[in-house]
């Protein structure tokens, strides 16, 4: 079955799905995006993802291509047309098509909307979580507003590639104070030996992950302690557990940082329990 993409009002086979070469997303990375998990064919936490998209659009003064409700319909339709049971739906909005000029187009042009959906391999993802991943640390060289989910991801791309070339799976960004900000496409967490969960406060230096937000509810309900603050790389090396959270991986244990084993070098019980419990707290559309 060929995959179907939604592009500016039409559902098209992937091979025919294209945007104009003067789309500002293509030329300037002038756009925003979201990734939402799909389970049993239903969207997970889509309400929150749509809210965050709206915030990102507003922050960059990009017009919404349609209402959140209408966009929800398009997302569901794209999932159905691609027959995704377990996987992700990706949606991005750019400032639209205009002759290349750094300033916003004047008069304004319609924003571009692209939606794709694809299945993920559940068995492979579960096996990855059961094994845990290795990460490396890299200097955080991103701009000062990574709380906006823009499609300009070059530092993230280079960080991930650097990790792979060094035999790891992902990279953790570290700021000028040696504090961990987040991973290349996920939020970073540790569990201390006292059993407290620690993740950086959601300021302009991290993306406020939807998975992260829902996990706060899980943690509270499970009676665990959480400390929302900066933690250093040295604290992470000395942690009992570490993990990352994102819509595509939910809770993924980290068992090694910069070649050092975390805890006993195996996925920790807290991370695995949170991964197991997560979907009891997430919204299902
Ligand atoms: N990434 N931080 C960054 C830099 C991210 O790119 C992401 C998500 C997150 C976690 O956010 P959420 O829990 O809402 O997925 C944190 C998506 C999955 C991606 O780029 O593929």
Image (spheres, rainbow, N blue to C red):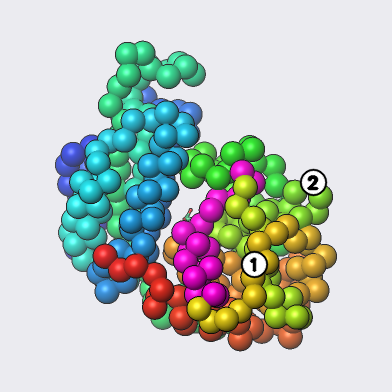
Q: Residue 233 — which label? A: none
- Estimate the x, y position of residue 10 in percent, counting from the top left: 17, 42
**Residue 213 vertical position relative to residue 22 in the rendered view, above or below:** below
> Mark 1 highlights which residue?
189
* Ligand 1 within 8 Å, label 2 CB: no
Residue at image location 61% in from the left, 43% down from the top: 204
Q: CA distance from mark 2 to mark 1?
A: 19 Å
Closest to the observer: 30 or 1?
A: 30
**Residue 7 vertical position relative to residue 265 in the rendered view, above or below:** above
In reply to whether residue 194 is colored magenta, the answer given is no
Count residues near mark 1 (Cα–Cα under 10 Å), then give few for <14, some for 14-19, many for 20+: many
- Estimate the x, y position of residue 119 in percent, counting from the top left: 32, 66
- Estimate the x, y position of residue 59 in percent, counting from the top left: 47, 34
> Mark 2 highlights which residue?
176
Quarter-of-image position of residue 95: top left
- Asked whether residue 87 appears in the rendered view, the answer is no
Report the span colored magenta.
204-220
């Amino acid at each position: 079955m060929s995959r179907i993409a939604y592009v500016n009002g039409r559902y098209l086979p992937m091979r025919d799905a294209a945007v104009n070469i003067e789309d500002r997303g293509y030329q300037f990375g002038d756009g925003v995006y979201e990734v939402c998990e799909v389970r049993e064919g239903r969207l997970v936490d889509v309400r929150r993802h749509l809210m965050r998209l709206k915030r990102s659009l507003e922050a960059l003064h990009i017009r919404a291509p349609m209402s959140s409700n209408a966009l929800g319909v398009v997302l569901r339709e794209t999932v159905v047309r691609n027959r995704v049971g377990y996987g992700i739906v990706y949606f991005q909005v750019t400032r639209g098509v205009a002759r290349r000029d750094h300033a916003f187009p004047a008069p304004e042009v319609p924003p571009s909307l692209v939606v794709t959906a694809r299945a993920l391999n559940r068995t492979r993802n579960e096996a990855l979580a059961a094994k845990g991943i290795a990460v490396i640390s890299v200097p955080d060289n991103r701009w000062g507003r990574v709380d906006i989910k823009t499609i300009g991801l070059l530092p993230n791309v280079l960080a991930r590639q650097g990790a792979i070339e060094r035999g790891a799976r992902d990279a953790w960004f570290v700021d000028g104070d040696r504090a961990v900000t987040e991973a290349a496409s996920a939020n970073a967490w540790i569990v201390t030996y006292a059993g407290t969960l620690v993740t950086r406060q959601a300021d302009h230096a991290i993306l406020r992950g939807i998975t992260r937000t829902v996990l706060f509810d899980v943690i509270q309900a499970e009676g665990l302690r959480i400390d929302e603050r900066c933690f250093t790389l040295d604290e992470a090396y000395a942690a009992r557990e570490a993990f990352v959270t994102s819509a595509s991986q939910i809770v993924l244990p980290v068992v090694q940082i910069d070649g050092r084993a975390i805890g006993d070098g195996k996925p920790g019980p807290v991370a695995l329990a949170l991964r197991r419990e997560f979907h009891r707290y997430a919204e299902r559309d």
